[in-house]
Amino acid sequence: MSAGDDGMRTATEAPDGGPVLRLESVRKTYGRGTVVLRDVDLEVAPHTVTALIGASGSGKSTLLRCANLLEEIDDGAIFLDGEEITDPRVDEDAVRRRIGIVFQAYNLFPHMTVLDNITLAPRRVHGVPRAEAEARAHELLERLGLGGRAGEYPDRLSGGQQQRVAIVRALAGRPRLLLLDEITAALDPELVGEVLGVVRDLKEEGMTMVIATHEMGFAREVADQVCFLDGGVVLERGTAGQVFGDPQHGRTRQFLERIIAAGRL
Amino acid sequence: MTYVQDALEKADDGYLPSARRLERERFKRTRARRATALAALSTLVTGAVLFLVITRSPGWPRTRATFFSAEYARKALPKVLEGLLLNLKLLVVCGAAVLVIGLLLAIARTLRGPVFFPLRALATAYTDFFRGLPLIICLLMVVFGVPALRLQGVTTDPVVLGGSALVLTYSAYVAEVFRAGIESVHPSQRAAARSLGLSSGQALRHVVLPQAVRRVVPPLLNDLVSLQKDTGLVSIAGAVDAVYAAQIIAGKDFNYTPYVVAGLVFVALTIPMTRFTDWVTARMDRRRAQGGTV
């Protein structure tokens, strides 16, 4: 599925393929002055994959949650297709309809079948007729190797299957941008592969994605742009080759060395 | 502007809010003010309409004299408050008994294994019966039926009997609340406790019940508020509580103002309880909250 031909674009979108997502001096604090994101700038070009790497607590998840307006930023601005979405006058629900997000813990609705999980938003939010929504759900499930699972409840599926259902659920709304928040962190190594394979396929199809991940090998392989976050600051950014091959910053080198020592790169 | 000032005082990294942020917050403040004004206005209008409809109704002067007479209210208040003491005593004693018996019933119902079948069946039959039996009928049967047996050594005190009837009924309700709580604790919690070598009873006592009770605090307090009002029903047994005190005065002159006074006193008593419930619930929510503004 090409991300561009689905009619989800807005009138304000830059026609020349300007960035899909842009963060400008984003600042986010929690509670009593804990700064989670400090002056973060980021640009995500159409049909590219951006990987956010960094230790736990470096702000990767918060950045994704802010981009989906699940968290309110303190300062700065976030643009989707050139339109500022952090403006309080903007309808948050309309913005979220254009962004898909997949969480580490799947967050599938346990009281609904796989099919109902997937068709909930298309039917209730996008007003797609049931038959059409279900046809698309079946098609996506088939493509992600989950054909025949539509009638099951999430608890009956393995972690990898659940996470793939969560990806299908995020894709069902034909999002402009897909955010993946450490989607393999809760999976055992055998299941990691099947989920990352799906992400690889989505990249082939031209999906614009931002991925927070601890899978360095995967980030290196799939990402067009890699950002290293440390203490809420983007310390280093560049192509995968630059950041992994020739890190400029001491902290980045230290982080990568630890990862290598742990045998994860 | 306190929000931005807060952020400034907190910032230790030389952060200064941008013009964009200031504008954003100005807009949000304006919007909040507009929403508040609109809400206040609509409340005012609704109140005014209600007031006019009631005071303009043809029977209003008569109603006011019968239900809202200041003179009768003054006369009734001391007696009603005196009677209220009985309601409060009943609430404390019955409330404690209900919690204990309800919890025991709930535990009896959740026991597994064939050995406990009689206990389980008994507890189930009890809750089925007393949850279905209307409180007023339970009260009448206990209050007038038990003395009619003329058993030696059994009290005929209407307060004790009325209180017993309340405990009988409310224990059944509360038992079901507790049971819902116990069953909502995930089986893996029990498995984890048993895996550490805790006995079934220890697992219940130290792992399952603390989580279960915490979860059912709001519905429990709800039942407690309900019990507080229903203590007024012991008046049918002839115990002089707030409601009966009102009835005595009302009966003399066919003026119902004392009832209204008693009603308001009960409401006044319930409100702190309700706010307490809200506070407890909010505190638990905050503890469990994991951030997010949605």
Image: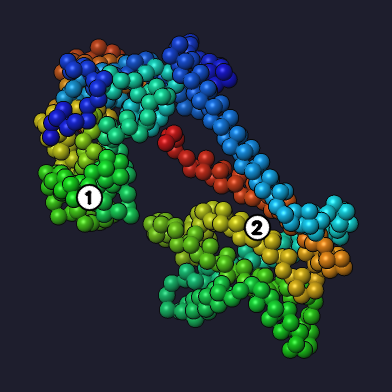
**Which mark is on residue A68?**
none
Q: Which kind of residue does numbered mark 1 sit on?
A: Arg
Question: Is residue B59 depicted above or below A140 in this figure?
Answer: below
Relative to B258, A117 lies left or right: left
* Viewer-side residue, B204 vs A164: A164
Circle 2 sits in a helix, a strand or a loop, which is it?
A: helix
Q: Which kind of residue does numbered mark 2 sit on?
A: Val
Residue occupying image coordinates x 77% and y 70%: B235
Give a yes or no on whether discs 1 and 2 share a subunit: no
Subunit ID for the residue under disc 2: B
Task: Looking at this view, name the residue that lies furthest to the front.
Answer: B58
- Which residue in the protein does label 1 denote? A130
Residue B137 position in % (x across, y down): 65, 77
Subunit ID for the residue under disc 1: A
Residue B248 position in % (x across, y down): 84, 68
Relative to B182, B268 lies left or right: right
Classify mark 2: residues with Cα within 10 Å, few (<14), some (14-19) or many (20+). many
Q: In the rendered image, which quarter is residue A72 located in?
A: top left
Question: Is residue A182 depicted above or below B163 in this figure?
Answer: above
User: Is residue B31 visible in the rendered structure shown here?
Assistant: yes
Circle 1 sits in a helix, a strand or a loop, which is it?
A: helix
Residue occupying image coordinates x 30% and y 20%: A83
